Each structure stands twice: as structure tokens, then as C-alpha cells.
Image (spheres, helix red, strand yellow):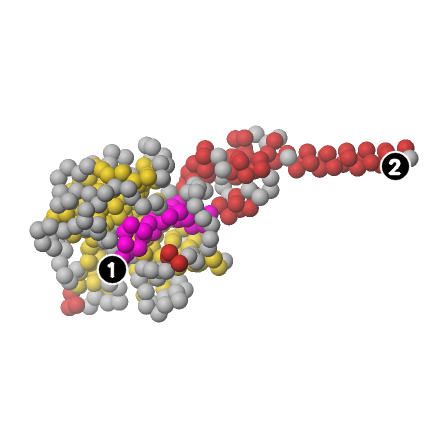
Amino acid sequence: MLHRRQETMVGDEESLKKRKIKGISIVDISEDLLVEILSRLTVESLMQLRCVCKAWRDFIRRPDFISKHYLMQTTLRNVNLIVSHERSFFSLLSSCSDVDDTLRVTETIKIEDENFLRDLYVMGPCNGLICLAHKSNIHRIFLWNPATREYKHLPLSTVESRPRSEDGTLGFDFDSKNDDFKVLRIPTIRRGGYRGFNCIHQVELYSLKSDSWKQISVVGMIPSNIYVEWSNVYHAGIQYWWAELKYVQMLLSFDFVDEVFELVPYVGARHNIMSTLDLGIFNGSLASSHGELGCKRRGKCFDIGVMTEHQVKDRWVRMIRIGPFPEFKRPLGFWKNSVVFSQSHSLILYDMNTQKLKNVPVASSFPRCDMAVANYVENLVPIKGSRKENDSR
């Protein structure tokens, strides 16, 4: 009897040791070291670690750790390329290594939700989040975190709208001063012709932190011609769009911190029906691409320029002219030192250093579809929504 009791005590002691060893990783390692280790892991790995125990889950959910993790991923240049296809189908592309910039599809994501079955505006990514909205109804808006698979249907605005407009312009950015994601909505209510102003200053702003909409005042008037499809980009807390006023190309911007608009003329090449004009982000700077037919109509040439100073919004410097490319209509964006185009089921990367083209196959379920690309860094930031999706790895 005594012998059996001793065996029981030994067994309890071994069990206690195992429980203690299991807790070493969260208890006995210094917090600074733990943050340093965990912040280098992918979101997928951290999501798995959250299931280990409550202590792990609470630690990974801490806002300070989430901020540290995103900063570390940015510092490590763990930048992916996210491609939006038709409707709600996305591809995530990553480099094979730090030395080799070769892109490959690492993940495909299909959001299985009846609300996503229509054509969508895709805005962002911004600090790891993407904003989606129906092209036919800008009041149907969603925020989505591709890394955690959370998405959130934004509430309908309580701001009275007369008359109600189903189309318009949207913007999405991160307010770093208030640590808040915000969505801007400008209903299209034209007065004075197609190239006139949007004379009804009904501009609404959504705050994720308060989960509510508010109306913001506008000084001056906003052009009704805002080109959302190929210019909707953000940089350093400011959203930019190409706009047109009395046949003059303009750069419209909205500061999400100060909540003010600014409209300045574009002093670059004149845009016409035969040319293309796009905005993007290249190496941390606002960039423009102006495409026009080259000599003997052998294809389009593209002038790539960057804004030299953030404070001087009419200072553009042309970096390089590329082309002619007979098969490309317009660039989709930039990846490191490459300009990204699309062709059939592939992305075509033009390296501005080597002046060589590289083909990156990207699967699509439709033979012909418009693609959009953007640089993407994953983030753990929660949006308090659903987690319903179907992804292929």
C-alpha cells in the first residue's frame, strides 16, 4: 500500500514537472526575448500558437505585440504581392528567398460569402487590411484581413442622404495619429454636366474604432470626375486619386488625420483618349505612369515618374521611359524594382534595372478578367468580424 502511494507521488511529481516545462516558454523567458522571437513568425504560425493555451492566446492578442509584429514584418521586408481577380478570388505571391526575387503563388483565397459574389472595388491593402465594396452599391462595404481571414460588414450610415446615390468614390487608409482605420465615401451627385463639380458636399467617414459613420465638412468643391479604377492609392496617411476638372488633369488627395481635401494640377504629360495615366507606390514614394503610343505605333511606351517631395505636390520627376510594349495596355503596379503588367493568366514583371521581362503564372477561373496588384504585409490586427472562407494552400 505504501509502495503504491509512493508510485503515485512520483507520478504526480513527474506530471508537475511536465506542466512546469510546458509553461517555461511563456513564464521563464524574458518578455523582450519572447516578443523578439514571436514577432518574426508568420501570422499563420501565431494563429496556431494561440491554440496552445490561454496565456499564449492573450499574449498574441495584445495590441502592443500586434504593433511590434507588424513593424518587424515590415522591417524584415516580408512584403508579398496580393492579386485580386474576378469577384472575390485572391492570390498571394511571395519571393522564394531574400536573394532571389522570383515570385511564386503561395496561397489562393476564395471568400465564400453571398455578399461577395458581385464585382468589387478593392482598396488597399493598408496596414494588412483590405476594403471591399460593391461597384453597383458603395453602401455595401466590408473590411477584410487576408492573414486572419476575419472580415466585417460595415454598418449602414445614419447620415441622411438626399438624394441617395449608389455609386461614387471610396477611400481607405490608416490614421496613425489616432490608431484607427477609416473609410471615406463620396457619393456621386453631379450638377453642371459630366465634367462639372459634385456640388453636394455629402462626404462621409467611417471609423473602425468607433464603428460608426460621420459627415465631414468640405471646403470648396470636389470634381465629379474621379478615376477610382486606376488611381486609388494611399501613401503616408493620404489617399490619392486622379481627377479631371475642365479637361485639366488634377491630383485629388484626402488627409485621413486632418480630414481635409486638397486639389492640385498635374503638371506632367497631358492625358487624352489614346493614353493612360495611373498612380502607384514605388520604393516608398508616390509614383505615376503615363502611357502613350510609341514611334510607328509599335506599342505603348510608359513614362514612370515619382513625386520628389511630399510637401510639393506638383513636383514630379521622370525616372525612366520603358517600352514600347505592343501587348500591354497599362501597368498594374510595382514590385520592388519592377513594373507589373498582366497578360492572360500571368503577371509580367519588367525589371527596370535589367530591362528584362519575367512571366509569373497566376491561376484564374475566368479566361478573361481584370486583375489588380498591391504590395502586402500581413497583420494580426483584429476587426471583430466573421471568419468564413475557403482557401487553398
Q: Which mark is residue 51?
A: none
Residue type at the position of mark 2: Arg
Q: Is residue 348 magenta?
A: no
Q: Position of residue 278 (x, y in %)?
A: 23, 53
Asked if residue 40 lies left or right of residue 241, the reply is: right
Q: Residue at x 28, y 42 (%)?
A: 158
Q: Of helix, strand and loop, which one carries label 1? A: loop
Asked if residue 253 lies left or right of residue 356, the reply is: left
Q: Position of residue 341 (x, y in %)?
A: 30, 60
Structural distance between the alpha carbons of marks 1 and 2: 80 Å
Q: Residue at x 60, y 39 (%)?
A: 53
Up/down of 334 relative to 183, above or below: below
| Whether residue 202 can be seen here | yes
Q: Residue at x 36, y 39 (%)?
A: 211
Q: Is residue 129 magenta?
A: yes
Up/down of 338 relative to 2, above or below: below
Q: Residues within 10 Å of mark 1 (few under 14, many from 20)?
A: many
Residue placed most toward the observer, 224 or 187: 187
Which residue carries the number 1 mark? 330
Residue placed most toward the observer, 188 or 242: 188
**Range of residues picked out in magenta:** 128-153
Which residue carries the number 2 mark? 4
Residue placed most toward the observer, 164 or 191: 164
- For the N terminus, the quadrant is top right
Nearer to us of marks 1 and 2 is 2
Residue type at the position of mark 1: Arg
